[in-house]
Amino acid sequence: MGDVDVVVVGAGPTGLTVACALAARGVRCRVVDRADRFFGGSRADSIQPRTLEVFADLGVLDPILASGDLGTVLRAYRGGEVVWEGRMTEPVAPTPSVPYPNIWLVPQFRTEEILRQRLAELGVRVERSTELVDFTQDADGVAATLVAHGATETVRARYLVGADGGRSTVRKRLGIAFPGETDESTTMLFADARVDGVSRDHGRIWPAGDSMVSVVPLTGTDLFVVTAPTPDNPDEPVGEHLQRQITEASGRDDIAVREVTWHTVWRANTRLAERFRVGRVFLAGDAGHVHPPTGGQGMNTGIQDGYNLGWKLAATLAGAADVLLDSYEPERMAAARAALDISTALLEKHRRGDDDAHVRGPEVHGLTLNYRTGPLSRDERAEPGALRAGDRAPDAPVTVAGRPTRLFDLFHGPQWTLLIFGAEHTPTAATLGDRFGPALRAHTVVRPGVPADEHALVDSDGHARAGYDAHDGTLVLVRPDGYVGLVAHPGSVEQVVEYWTALHGTPRATVGAIAR
């Protein structure tokens, strides 16, 4: 296949997200995975609201929604008595700023399948049974040695992304330390299985000594996810162990485990790499951070890594300054630390046996994650508002030329988006739009009934102003990944040009550079 711009090592959710973000921007990439078959287990099945927003931008939201649900009701039993009933998180209605407010449950194998299909639509296919065995790098690129079906190939790329899991070859080759701890005293067996004798209308949890046994329907399949304490005898067949655990914990002899299709032993493993970048090589997902499964943070954090890195690599390949790639590590390392804190706190609740240990609040949703202290965030107001540079840019309904739309629809794509509040600033939006071309789309946001250009965004119900805590004269520059880069009040052409030039060089040099 010859030389490419980026080699992505690992075809899990993180690697697939990086590749989709790159391919959507016309970047030549290869995705390699040493496994000879695609992953077939449920594993990380919780997709958080912020990840749903990412999936909407990647063009996979509809099949993701069609493949999952809000999760089933759970019932905790003691003997035959129900002692607790509820959901891990109670569904809430969408709001103007948060269109996807609930955790969506989809088996991980289906999420990966959907991302692979999208990647194929963009012209890239995952290369299975292809292992990265070595790489070297210099000032201009990376030489990666790949072995596939006994044949060795060296491919030259501008960048390499290690999304190859907790045992990452890329991380080890870079010599990056992976400090943390693995608590062998806290383990659990997870399995996907066909189970007879239980209905699919709710999930079941039974106490088992200091642990628990659960049988929960797996969305979109005829399987159940079964969790149980790990076997004392490593030679005991998994199916027999699960059967015995369920029978003993439930006190029922009518529940039968027919077939186990996938299983794994989870250990309380918490680790964070000391670096996410060395030169032209990057770590993403479990290669850089490993989380307890509590809170559903691991896969979601990895997907956010890939989304953050993808647009920055594409922009840098198109001529942007290296400061964009320099921002990846501080932004995503802080995010990984925050996710680890959430996961660890929830794990401690389980260890203590707290009554609300199964409950998940908004802290797991990813919507409050911010890059306020990151190198790309500039807030140039005398007094920062509720929404600040580095925050997630909220959605809001608006109308354009009488047609209803929403801000997320306008954000979709590889470009930056500029919102200038107030009809009197229409000339500013026009000037910036002309100057930057398709690399930046500038919009004036006006109140209803105010004379304005036909391309202005009419904030009919005031949701845009409320969500952005904006006033006439406020300027908000939104990054391609949906985070606020620059906020200014009063805003000016010069502020945008100064900010942009620091990242991309002079505006004329970037016109059309990141257009599809």
Image (spheres, rainbow, N blue to C red):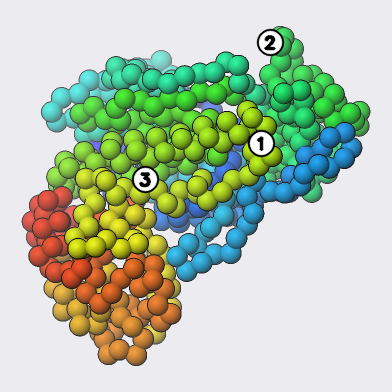
Q: Residues within 10 Å of mark 1 (few under 14, many from 20)?
A: few
Towards the viewer: 149 or 54: 54
Q: Residue at x 21, y 34 (%)?
A: 158
Q: Residues within 10 Å of mark 3 (few under 14, many from 20)?
A: many
Q: Residue at x 78, y 39 (%)?
A: 76
Residue assigned mark 2: 234
The kind of residue tagged 1 is: Asp
Image quarter (top left, top right, bottom left or bottom right) of the N terminus: top left
User: How far is the residue under mark 1 from the one under mark 3?
Assistant: 35 Å
Residue assigned mark 3: 307
Q: Residue at x 83, y 42 (%)?
A: 82
**Is 157 placed above or below 412 here?**
above
Q: Are marks 2 and 1 in contact (CB under 8 Å)?
A: no
Q: Is residue 81 visible?
A: yes
Residue 368 lies, in percent from the top left, at 42, 51
Residue 453 lies, in percent from the top left, at 25, 84
The kind of residue tagged 2 is: Pro
Q: Is residue 22 visible?
A: no
Disc 3, SS: helix
**Is 403 placed above or below 154 here?**
below
Towards the viewer: 54 or 145: 54
Tell how many labels: 3
Residue 303 lies, in percent from the top left, at 43, 42
